Amino acid sequence: MRFTWLSRYEPQIHAILRIISGLLFMEHGTQKFLSFPAGQYAGSGLALDGPGAYAGIIELICGFLIAIGLFTRPAAFLASGTMAVAYWMAHAPQDPFPVNNMGDAAILYCFVFLFLAAAGAGPWSVDNARRDDTPR
């Protein structure tokens, strides 16, 4: 079975990937700074006392920008780099395998955001609305 019929929806799927990944990324920042949702890291960023807190600022701001599609390329590039650093600093030292060191999400975020930095926001974005030409 061929899935070439999906290619006609590529711009919309691109936008959905951007929106969902941005919202999920932002959730890590809201947990650290707004204590929502409740969990192990709730409120952990408020003291601004370590790399996790600074990552939380990037998660909150870049996640929001990526979700709405504003300054998507630079926000996604910064988010991608942050997740690469997070993986190598926090996850990789624990165990060499991502499935064991809980680093799978950091790796996925890193490469999804690297893709968005290269491809841009796509349709349904503030970046696209600010341009006069059609979506790329």
Image (tube, grey):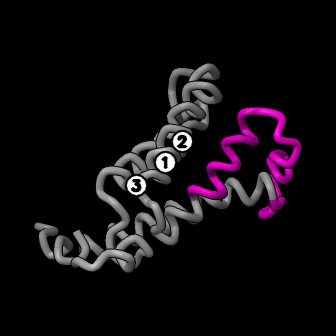
Q: Quadrant of the C terminus?
A: bottom left
Closer to the camera in the image, 12 or 97: 12
Kindly indicate whether the residue at mark 3 contacts the one at mark 2 (C-beta within 8 angstroms): no
Residue 14 circle label: none
Q: Which residue is mark 1?
A: 109
Kindly indicate whether the residue at mark 1 contacts the one at mark 2 (C-beta within 8 angstroms): yes
Closer to the camera in the image, 34 or 130: 130
In the drawing, does residue 92 fall left or right of residue 126? right
The amino acid marked with disc number 3 is: Arg
Crowding near the residue tagged with mark 3, few <14, some 14–19, many ≥20 C-alpha atoms within 10 Å: many
The amino acid marked with disc number 1 is: Tyr
- Residue located at (53% from left, 35% from top): 99
Mark 2 vs mark 3: in front = 3
Residue 3 picture quarter: bottom left
Distance of mark 2 from mark 3, alpha carbons? 18 Å
The amino acid marked with disc number 2 is: Ala
Residue 39, magenta (yes or no): yes
- Residue located at (76% from left, 57% from top): 31
In the drawing, does residue 64 fall left or right of residue 8? right
Element marked by disc 2: helix
Residue 101 picture quarter: top right
Above or below: residue 92 compared with residue 31: above
Residue 73 circle label: 3
Element marked by disc 3: helix
Residue 80, magenta (yes or no): no
For the record, the magenta segment spans 34-62
Closer to the chain start, of discs 1 and 3, is 3
Closer to the chain start, of discs 2 and 3, is 3
Q: Which residue is mark 2?
A: 106
The image position of residue 10, as x and y in percent, is: 24, 70
